[in-house]
Amino acid sequence: MDEDGTLAGILGKWSGKRVIYLTEESLKSTLLHSVIALLALISLVSLYLVVKLRKLSEKLDSDVKQRTREFHDANELLRKANAELEEISMVDKLTDISNRRCFESTFQKIWAICMRERHPLALIMIDIDNFKPFNDTYGHLAGDQCLKSVAEAIKSVVKRAGDLVARFGGEEFIVMLLNTTEEDAAIVAEDIRKKIESLGINNEAVCSVVTVSLGVAAAIPDNSISPDELINAADMALYQAKKGGRNQVAGLSGVSGGRGC
């Protein structure tokens, strides 16, 4: 103990208390272990966050894929619905053949192809003879059935791939024949006329069976003629068939077939 009582004073100050004596080495060791423990804790927290973020990322990726599939499925359903609507809009509900809209759309496309390939394109315009008297005599239900029967008869003759049968409006039908001259189209038209006459659908209003008149026109499309001009030519030929007595085929080269009563 020093004479000034310093040590005694210090010991007296700490008397009754727990005192830990640290050496420099033990202090360094304690600090090192503390740092290691802290780093381990940081690593565990980082690992936890990484795992959690990975799970969140996987869930997000799964959700995105699910939404993508749902979006694709919805688009596919919409595409199918649109296709069905488009098909419905292109088909005549009564006769179940192509309608005028379908014909006009297809005719424009085929016209361009035939112009490029220099192929002839033929039209047959068909009109049921004395259809109004038939409707007045037998009623509209019988008239509808007559239209269906005529449409079926035309389809049974025009079977070649690429050709088109359509209801043009009312009791009028139109046939488009690819790569066909007027002479060959007139042969097809005569077959249609005979087929419909052979159905034997009675039309007492005109003392006959149901018949049709047909107008034929053909051309090799080029810049000197428009699609509408070919339609008009077939329509004019049909008028000539009607004027000539009905139940016949008419074209620029003449008239063939039976005669109405």
Image (tube, rainbow, N blue to C red):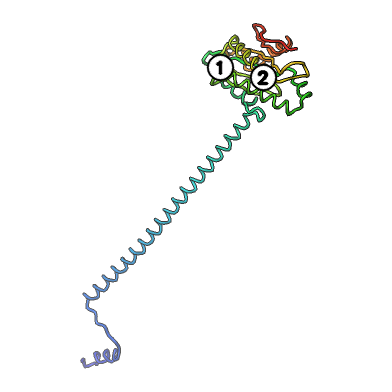
Report helix, strand or loop for mark 2. loop
Residue 162, horizontal then vertical, whole percent = 55, 21
Number of numbered discs on residues: 2
In the rendering, at what x and y percent does residue 239 appear? Answer: 71, 13
Q: Is residue 55 above or below residue 38?
A: above
Looking at the image, the residue that sits furthest to the top is: 253
| Residue at the spot 26% in from the left edge and 83% down from the top edge | 20
* Residue located at (64% from left, 6% from top): 253
Between marks 1 and 2 in the image, the one whose residue lies nearer the viewer: 2
Residue 123 location, quadrant: top right
Where residue 213 sits in the image (x, y, percent)? 69, 15
Decide if residue 196 is on the left or right side of residue 56. Answer: right
Q: On the image, which quarter does residue 112 sit in?
A: top right
**Quadrant of the rendered image containing residue 171:** top right
Viewer-proximal residue, 97 or 19? 97
Q: Which mark is residue 199?
A: 2
Query: Which mark is drawn over residue 134?
Result: none
| Residue type, numbered disc 2 | Leu
Q: Quadrant of the N terminus?
A: bottom left
In the image, residue 28 sits, relative to residue 21, either above or below, namely above
Question: Is the C terminus in the top left, top right, bottom left or bottom right quadrant?
Answer: top right
**Circle nearer the N terminus (1, 2):** 1
Identify the residue shown where x is 47% and y is 51%: 63
- Sort mark 1 into few (<14), some (14-19) or many (20+) by Cα contacts within 10 Å: many
Of residues 134 and 13, the one drawn nearer to the viewer in this rendering: 134
Label 1 – label 2 distance at C-alpha: 27 Å
Callout 1 secondary element = strand
Q: In the rendered structure, which amino acid carries the disc numbered 1?
A: Leu
Q: Residues within 10 Å of mark 2 (few under 14, many from 20)?
A: some
Q: Nearer the viewer, residue 41 or 103?
A: 103
Q: Position of residue 46 (x, y in %)?
A: 36, 61
Q: What residue does disc 1 label?
A: 178
